Amino acid sequence: MTLRLTPEQDHALTLLASAHGTSKHEAVVRAIALAAARTVQDTTVDELARQHIKGRSALEADIRRSRSHALPAGQHEESSGL
């Protein structure tokens, strides 16, 4: 696949890669994973996000822990509709 960018888009990608200390390729892959994870609910996208977004797995675990503490005693996430 070839990704054609305007000079302005390439500049933005260069800055993004530099900010994350990655290559442009990795910056694109990370941006796709991040955008997809925020936009769609899909198990493949979730796994992609866990692989490419630093701290994603830990964040998900923290959210699950917080939700379980916020539920009434004996109620689980599945039955609460979360």
Image (tube, grey):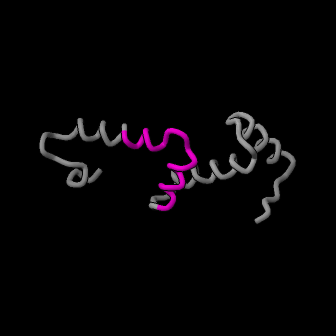
In the image, farthest residue toward the right: 7
Residue at image position (20%, 48%) is 76
Specify whether 38 is left or right of 32. Answer: left
Q: Quadrant of residue 18?
A: top right
Residue at image position (48%, 43%) is 56
Q: Is residue 66 above or below residue 52?
A: above
Q: Quadrant of residue 62?
A: top left
Q: Locate the N terminus by quadrant.
A: bottom right
Residue 7's spot in the image, x, y percent? 87, 48
Residue at image position (82%, 54%) is 5
Residue 61's spot in the image, x, y percent? 37, 41
In the image, farthest residue toward the left: 74
Specify whether 57 is left or right of 20. Answer: left
* Magenta span: 44-61
Residue at image position (16%, 47%) is 75
Specify whether 40 is left or right of 71. Answer: right
Q: Quadrant of residue 63?
A: top left
Residue 50's spot in the image, x, y percent? 50, 49
